[in-house]
Amino acid sequence: MRVLSVASEAYPLVKTGGLADVVGALPGALAPHGIATTTLLPGYPAVLKAAGRNVVRAWDDLLGEPARLLAGGIDGHPLLVLDAPALFARDGGPYADATGRDWDDNWRRFAALSRAAADIAPDYDLLHAHDWQAALAPAYLRYDGATVPSVVTIHNIAFQGRFDADVFAALRLPAAAYAIDGIEYYGGIGLLKAGLASASAITTVSPSYAAEIRRPSFGMGLEGLIAARQGAVHGIVNGIDPAIWSPEADAALPATYGARTLGRRRTNKRAIETAFALDRDDGPVFVVVSRLTWQKGMDVLADALDALVAMGGRLALLGSGDAALEAAFLAGQARHPGRIGVRIGYDETLSHLLQGGGDAILIPSRFEPCGLTQLYGLAYGCVPVVARTGGLADTVIHANEAALAAGVATGIQFDAVTPDDVLAALQRAIALYRVPGAWGGMQRQGMRADFSWNRSGARYAELYRSLIAA
Ligand code: ADP
């Protein structure tokens, strides 16, 4: 089976979040199931470096711009790069300029990616589009009258690709597509919406999130469409790539370790204390590796810093995002030197160290489609302390008394993303940390859990097969 996977980012070439990890891992996850995945990415400068000179296809006029498709490789799997300099040859990030301002022509950039995907999709058995940036591809297939089946995966329904209606003509869809069951969305256009209305199947990245997005509080305007397509919606949890995330063989760690050698984590904890200028004591170090945004509950955590320190906690935080939140954490560090350490920025190596030496990773998300940092925490014995939502609810086993007695607990969950609930969870973590055997038991239980792609790869394969047979 040949699958075309289309996305705006893929690790290790370009990454702003979990989407990249998943798109990068999928080809390897699907290969054992007899599926050959070709990944199609925009030709940003960093991605063009992975492309060869072999031109697979060329367009004089791809939604108004000349473009060509170059063949390359990503981790040993086939890659196609959409080389369209007018759209992608820019400094800055994949979606925004260096100051963080979204590119004005994002609608055209990603519509062109989707148009290119739809043009070549008939060479494949199935098209798999990720998030709004690729979601127009199934809509193009539908209005082309193509028969190749398609899947749209929602990695985060908060990002919908909404634009003004006046760009509709430039998308070169038939007029009939500007309709309630097509691309029209509250008087404008919605690229994710068009994909959800058009794809053969919809997946999202955890069963809980699949249920949550049927409700207004999580569906963000798309709940009606999700509910109407309920029979076509599947929740498949993300896996993690053990080639990149294994504490036994992680080059980013001063000390590698396994479930039987947890004592070696102490070396990594010392490295965190040094890097973040934290005091040394015998209590836990909480860590955060996150976008600093409202979704991630970082405003609530910022408000809880003084109380966290008052209860004897220490925090090492790595993140970047909203300027006001960055400032709030830096102010917390200034108020509590030695107790709060903050690194603003994006640093893959440091993220591994925090998982490999931190005692607990704190994830107070208001919503979390899947979440990867709790999975890395589980694999690394960095106990997740998480809000009970989406993929966090599905992957962490809360340390209630029954779970502790049965030895199955892997972390701590809390209900409301409020300072009170977050602090109560931290208090519980600090208390459990002092119960002999309890903390190590949770660490080992988490490390034993299988969050590799084995199960999820099989579920995607099963879904693809059912769509191709239909
Ligand atoms: P999201 O995709 O919503 O940001 P996920 O938990 O699914 O959240 O994925 C986040 C990914 O980005 C993880 O791989 C995490 O380690 C990484 N990450 C987030 N912030 C940083 C940072 N400041 N430095 C390094 N890695 C980061």
Image (cartoon, helix red, strand yellow):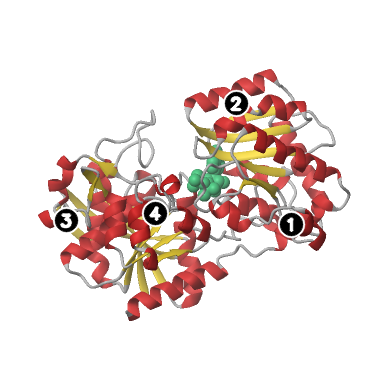
Q: Position of residue 111 (x, y in %)?
A: 24, 50
Q: CA distance from mark 1 to mark 3?
A: 50 Å
Q: What residue is disc 3 on?
A: 177
Give x and y (percent) for residue 372. Answer: 56, 52
The amino acid type found where label 4 is placed reads Ala
The x, y position of residue 234, in whole percent, is 44, 65
Which amino acid, mark 1?
Ala
Q: Which disc number belongs to residue 409?
A: 1
- Specify the amino acid type for callout 3: Ala
Q: Which residue is mark 4?
A: 50
Q: Nearer the viewer, residue 229 or 323?
A: 229
- Residue drawn at 52 percent across, 57 percent down: 208
In front: mark 2 or mark 3?
A: 3
The circle drawn on residue 130 is none
Asked which quadrant contains residue 395, the reply is bottom right
Q: Secondary structure at mark 2?
A: helix
Residue 123, percent from left and from top: 26, 72
| Marks 2/3: CA–CA distance | 46 Å
Q: Secondary structure at mark 4?
A: loop
Q: CA distance from mark 3 to mark 4?
A: 36 Å
